[in-house]
Structures are given as structure tokens and as C-alpha cells.
Amino acid sequence: MREWQRYLPASVLGAGCLLVGTTTTQQRQMTLAAPLESVPRALAGYPSVDRSISADERRVVGVSAYLFREFNRGSQAAFTVYVGYYDHQLQGKAIHSPKNCLPGAGWEVVSAAEEQLPTAAGPVPVNRYLLVNKHQRAMVYYWYQGRGRVEGNEYRVKLQLLRDAALRGRSDEALVRVVIPVETTDSAAAVLGRRVSAELVPEMFRVLPG
């Protein structure tokens, strides 16, 4: 083993400790550029009503601000939009991945994929999940947006978070999730999900810190 290789594990550990220390002590709490409520109340032509989450639920997820809207087709929900914004992230106050939360709520994953979504802000990577819970099916689109980026892959999100916390003193980010109940076909739900998500991405860039 070469001499420099003996010190490589310690160097990596030291760099990790430096990043963690920077992440926890030097972060800026970033204020939204505009309220989440300013996101259009009609998306893909559907009107909406605001819903709330309980104080206990909000405390568990640790959000700084959130938006939860139900978009209706007549008397039925066509889809829901949830945005959870974190002005900074620490241990115990960080984004919870839907990949972990949805199965815990009784939903089983039928298929999962990352796809490139064309938007007015350019193509962005998002996650698409098809879920089933007994006789119910749902199409879910979700992604992470903040610090000028859109990302779907959790591993890349974590790497970017560590880098930005160390170099920019920022860890602000939003989880954006669109849930479409499957009423007719999976493909029809996916078409609606892509349309709604494509409208949301530039709106989120507008309200999130630059």
C-alpha cells in the first residue's frame, strides 16, 4: 500500500465531518420569494380548494411552509398537489422521501421510473410511481426543487445538499408531489400528471428563493 493510501480513509472521514459541521452550524434560513399560496389555484384547467394538515403532522415532517390543494373534476378529486418547503435542513428537520412514506401508508409500488419532463424552464428529471392500495390505483409524480435545481434522484439530492451547505451555506429545498387517482387508465393518469407537473415547475422557481 502506498503511503498516501494509508491516510485516504481518514481524509474522507475528515471531509465528511467538515461537511456535516458546516451543514449544521452555518446554514442560512432562506425566505420564500413569494408565498406558496400564490401558486395558481387552477392547474390543467381544474379548480382547487386548499386543504390543511394537522399541527402534529406538520411537526413530524418539519416543514417551514406547505401547500396542500385538491383539484376537482365536478364532485371528485382529479388530483392533489403537495409542496413542503424547508428554509434549511437539519437532522430531524429534513425532507422525507415519498419512496419511504407512501408504502408505510398502505400503498404498494407497481412500477417506478425517473423521466425527463419538458417544461417552460427546460427539461427536468422527475419521479413517476404507479401505486395500488386494495382496489385503488394512483399515479404519483414527485421531485425535489430548490437552490436553482430540479432533481428526482435521492442520492444526487443528498450530494448536492452537502455541497451547497458547505460551499453556499444553503440547504433550502422543496418536495413537490402530484397524486392522480386512476379513474380510467394508467396512461390517462400519467398524461394528466405530466401536464400538471410541467405547469408546476416554473411556478415553483418563481416562489422559491433564487
Image (tube, rainbow, N blue to C red):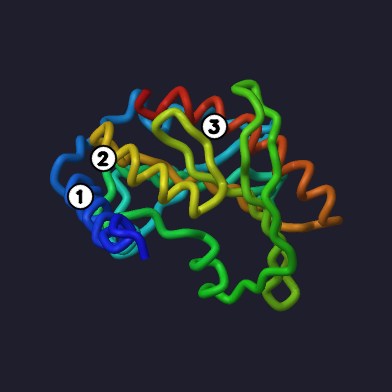
Report the residue at 33% width, 37% height from top: 164
Secondary structure at badge 2 equals helix
Comes first in the chain, label 3 or label 1: 1
Where residue 27 sits: x, y (%)?
Answer: 20, 40
Q: Amino acid type of disc 3?
A: Arg
- Viewer-proximal residue among 120 and 159: 159
Comes first in the chain, label 3 or label 2: 3
Alpha-carbon neighbours of circle 1 within 10 Å: few (<14), some, or many (≥20)? few
Q: Which residue is label 1 attached to?
A: 18
- Viewer-proximal residue among 111 and 159: 159
Q: Amino acid type of disc 2?
A: Ala
The image shows residue 98, relative to residue 135, as above or below, that is above
Secondary structure at badge 3 equals loop
Where residue 41 is drawn, which disc sits there? 3
C-alpha gap between disc 1 and disc 2 = 8 Å
Alpha-carbon neighbours of circle 2 within 10 Å: few (<14), some, or many (≥20)? many
The answer to whether the residue labelled 1 contacts the one labelled 2, judged by CB atoms less than 8 Å apart, is yes
Secondary structure at badge 1 equals helix
Report the residue at 20% width, 49% height from top: 18
Whether residue 204 is visible here, answered yes or no, is yes
Q: Which residue is label 2 attached to?
A: 166
Quadrant showing the N terminus: bottom left
Where residue 135 sits: x, y (%)?
Answer: 75, 74
The answer to whether the residue labelled 3 contacts the one labelled 1, judged by CB atoms less than 8 Å apart, is no
Report the residue at 86% width, 56% height from top: 185
The image shows residue 115, relative to residue 7, as above or below, that is above
Where residue 181 sits: x, y (%)?
Answer: 70, 57
